[in-house]
Amino acid sequence: MSQQYPYGVGISNVGSYQVSGIPYATSSLAAPASSGTPTEVSFPDVTQRIFVSNLINQPLRVGFSSNGIKGTNYFIIPAATPATVFPTQEFRVKVSSIFLLSHTSTPTSASVFAELSNIEQTLLNKSGPTGLPNWSGSVGVG
């Protein structure tokens, strides 16, 4: 092993993603109306994979920055219906937080399950082009 380039846990370290993730779960998260302030779900470590379920019959926005979710950089999880009790979207991303907001003027609710890596948030913060969590301000993020 080179002393100049030590091997260890990090964003580009394959071994950090080959092991099972550490579970993280939270439910009944409020997602305010589209004109409100987005709800941030902050993870203790960098994620490997995230599942977001929409619990109410209102469409739900999921984004990777507050500006992105209030603008045009977000995903929409459809409203819950009798046919799709809790529509769920999977995201295989390396982030330290996500943002939730209703897609309409009516608030909604969500559950989040994530698989966490053993990578500290501080390592993610150093890797983005702006040096901020979740690369806020990047093209496609917000």
Image: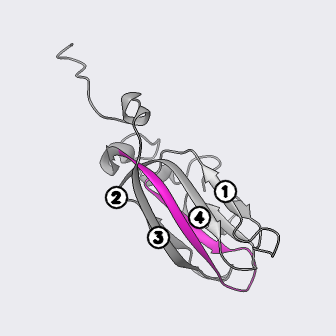
> Nearer the viewer's eye, disc 3 or disc 2?
3
In the image, taking residue 50 as reference, residue 20 lies left or right, namely: left
x, y percent for residue 85: 73, 71
Residue sitting at x 59%, y 64% = 67
Q: Is residue 19 left or right of residue 32?
A: left
User: Where is residue 20, by image quadrant?
Assistant: top left
The tag earlier along the polypeptide, 1 or 3, is 3
**Labels 4 and 3 touching (C-beta < 8 A):** no
How far separated are the C-alphas under marks 4 and 2? 22 Å
- Amino acid type, residue under disc 4 in the picture: Asn
* Mark 4 lies on residue: 67
Q: In the image, what residue type sits under mark 3?
A: Thr
Q: Residues within 10 Å of mark 1 (few under 14, many from 20)?
A: some
Q: How many residues crowd around disc 4 within 10 Å: few (fewer than 14), some, or many (20 or more)?
A: some
Q: What's under tag 2, amino acid-wise?
A: Pro
Prevalent SS, magenta region: strand
Would residue 43 be counted in the magenta stretch? no
User: Which comes sooner in the sequence, label 1 or label 4?
Assistant: 4
The disc label shown at residue 26, or none:
3
Real-space CA distance between mark 4 and mark 3, rounded to the nearest whole angstrom: 23 Å
Residue 84, placed above or below residue 137: below
Q: Earlier in the sequence, mark 2 or mark 1?
A: 2
Confirm whether the magenta stretch covers residue 103. Answer: yes
According to the picture, the residue beneath numbered tag 2 turns out to be 44
Q: Are marks 4 and 2 in contact (CB under 8 Å)?
A: no
Contact (Cβ within 8 Å) of mark 3 with mark 2: no
